[in-house]
Image (tube, grey):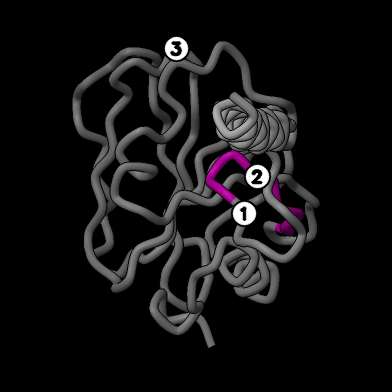
């Protein structure tokens, strides 16, 4: 009888230990979904940049799914907020506004961060907005009229040091995007 009780107590302790470990794991998983300071940040993170002399906050889309998603399904975009699209090589670029209800302007930048052109993009318009230049490596979407209102014209530069820091914070090697 004693041997059966000891076996039941051992089984109960193991079960209790398993339950406690499972609860501890669940409690750890209930934290806010924020990256640890030591780990890479996700596409939802905002980074400080300058375009010309104007301070902005940009989300950085690098992975193909991030680039494809872009600003879809966003109800608003702050006054000095936007999204930076990063490509590994310069080429002609084309964007559209599928599922984007915010009127936007897109700035097309060369590999050295020089703004080459700005094009308007209208909400839900799936017609392609294509760069005139075939040397575009970065694109920045901002609220429509932002570039004009801030005096940002072709020849202005994207803060490449900030781009390097943002890519590193996201866990990417900046050299893969041609950023030295």
Which image quarter: residue 108?
bottom left
- Stretch in magenta: 42-50
Query: Which one is in front in this view, the residue at disc 3 or the one at disc 2?
Result: 2
**Point 44% across, 12% down: residue:** 101
Q: CA distance from mark 1 to mark 3?
A: 26 Å
Which residue sits furthest bottom?
180
Secondary structure under tag 2 reads loop
How crowded pointer 2 is (Cα within 10 Å; few <14, some 14-19, many 20+) is rated as some
Along the line of sight, which residue is nearer the eye, 28 or 152?
A: 28
**Point 71% across, 61% down: residue:** 52
Query: Which one is in front in this view, the residue at disc 1 or the one at disc 3?
Result: 1
Q: Is residue 45 left or right of residue 134?
A: right
Q: Is residue 52 above or below residue 118?
A: below
Q: Position of residue 152 (x, y in %)?
A: 65, 51
**Which mark is on residue 41?**
1
Which residue sits furthest front?
1
Mark 1 or mark 3: which comes first in sequence? Answer: 1
Query: Which one is in front in this view, the residue at disc 2 or the one at disc 1?
Result: 1
Which residue position is annotated with label 3? 101
Disc 1 vs disc 3: Cβ atoms closer than 8 Å? Answer: no
Q: Quadrant of the N terminus?
A: top right
Q: Is residue 180 left or right of residue 126?
A: right
Which residue position is annotated with label 2? 45
**Point 35% across, 63% down: residue:** 87
């Amino acid at each position: 009888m004693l041997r059966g009780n000891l076996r039941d107590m051992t089984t109960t302790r193991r079960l209790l230990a398993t339950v406690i470990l499972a609860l501890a794991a669940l409690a750890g998983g209930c934290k806010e979904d924020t990256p640890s300071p030591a780990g890479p940040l996700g596409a939802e993170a905002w980074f400080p940049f300058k375009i010309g002399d104007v301070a902005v906050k940009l989300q950085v889309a690098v992975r193909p799914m991030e680039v494809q998603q872009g600003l879809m399904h966003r109800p608003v975009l702050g006054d000095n907020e936007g999204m930076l699209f990063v490509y590994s090589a310069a080429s002609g670029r084309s964007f559209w506004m599928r599922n984007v209800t915010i009127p936007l302007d897109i700035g097309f930048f060369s590999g050295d961060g020089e703004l080459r052109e700005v094009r308007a993009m209208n909400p839900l318009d799936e017609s392609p907005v294509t760069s005139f230049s075939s040397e575009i490596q970065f694109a920045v979407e901002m609220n429509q009229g932002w570039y004009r209102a801030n005096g940002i014209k072709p020849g202005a530069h994207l803060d490449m040091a900030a781009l390097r820091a943002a890519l590193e914070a996201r866990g990417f090697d900046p050299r893969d995007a041609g950023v030295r």
